[in-house]
Image (tube, grey):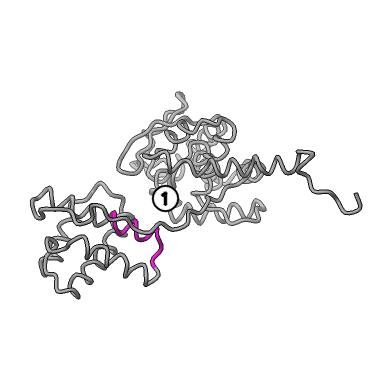
Amino acid sequence: MDTLERTLQDYLRSSPQFSPRTLEAYRRDLEGLTRYCREQGIEGWDQLDTALVRRYLAQRHREGASGRSLQRCLSAMRSLFRHMLQRRQAKADPTVGVRPPRGPRRLPEVLDVDQTAALLGPPGDDPLEIRDHAMFELAYSSGLRVSELTGLDLDDLDLPGASLRVVGKGRKERQLPVGSMARKALDAWLEARQHLARPDERALFTGRGGGRLTTRSVQQRLDRWARRRGLDVPVHPHMLRHSFASHLLESSGDLRAVQELLGHANISTTQVYTHLDFQHLAGVYDRAHPRARKKKSGD
């Protein structure tokens, strides 16, 4: 194992603050950079300079990497060099001042209020249906990421206090309100959970085998649930989070509150929902304003 590989493995082993998904993405990005360094005759990370970082990102861009992928790759490099600077394995960070090309920002997909009501209609008597209904109600009620949803423990839920403790990105905690419909669905699930969960299982949401549900299981169950409810659009867990933010902003206009509830570190991330809100307002205007409505043929 050469110096590049040893330093990379040490960094990956000592980065518990990242989620497994983020760490895996960083590993792939940095292994690609490692291969590029070897091709350039570089034997240690301390030989990497700003010009080479820019050339590597430019090569990735020519190969078709998206702006988002390049931003994540640069974040991985910055994280690696922070790690090295802390351990005096590098004297400078060659990523300082480097900016990747920005890709076009896509507006998030959301359900409208009627679609959400159809999706979250009452379940049947099957315990797994009761669980799924509680999960989806809670995800929409509190704007949860799917990883936050599956990471919940029983101790995180305070039903009498109508609140929820969530550990989000960067291991940051936030306290969230739980709506009345979600509380009712959770009451039903906690009753059914006694017959499904293992006695020592701490997870709030468990599977047929009694253990914690995976994010993939939630995605599959929501897709199946939405199709059974007659929705004609693909539905994924993050769409419930987007819908929560869009509907709340549409009703309240309070961008700062939505930022806090979503756990966004930067308000610019939350501002994407103002574009959705404007689209809604523009649609109302087009349908209702006497000078905006299109004339029917023959008028």
| Left or right, residue 117 beside residue 103 | right
Badge 1 crowding class, 10 Å Cα cut-off, few under 14, some 14 to 19, many 20 or more, is: some
| Left or right, residue 239 beside residue 42 | right
Give 267 or 135, whichever is nearer the viewer: 267
- Relative to residue 251, is residue 24 depicted above or below? below
Give 225 or 53, whichever is nearer the viewer: 53
Q: Amino acid at mark 1?
A: Leu
- Location of residue 60 in the rendering, given as x and y in whole percent from the top left corner: 33, 68
Q: Residue furthest left?
A: 88
Residue at x 40% of width, y 43% of height = 148
Residue 72 falls within the magenta-colored stretch: yes
- Relative to residue 7, is residue 159 depicted above or below? above
Number of marks present in the image shown: 1
Give 215 or 269, whichever is nearer the viewer: 269
| Left or right, residue 187 beside residue 214 | right
Task: Give the magenta-colored segment's residue range.
Answer: 65-75
What quarter of the picture does the N terminus occupy? Answer: bottom left
- Residue at mark 1: 213
SS type, badge 1: loop
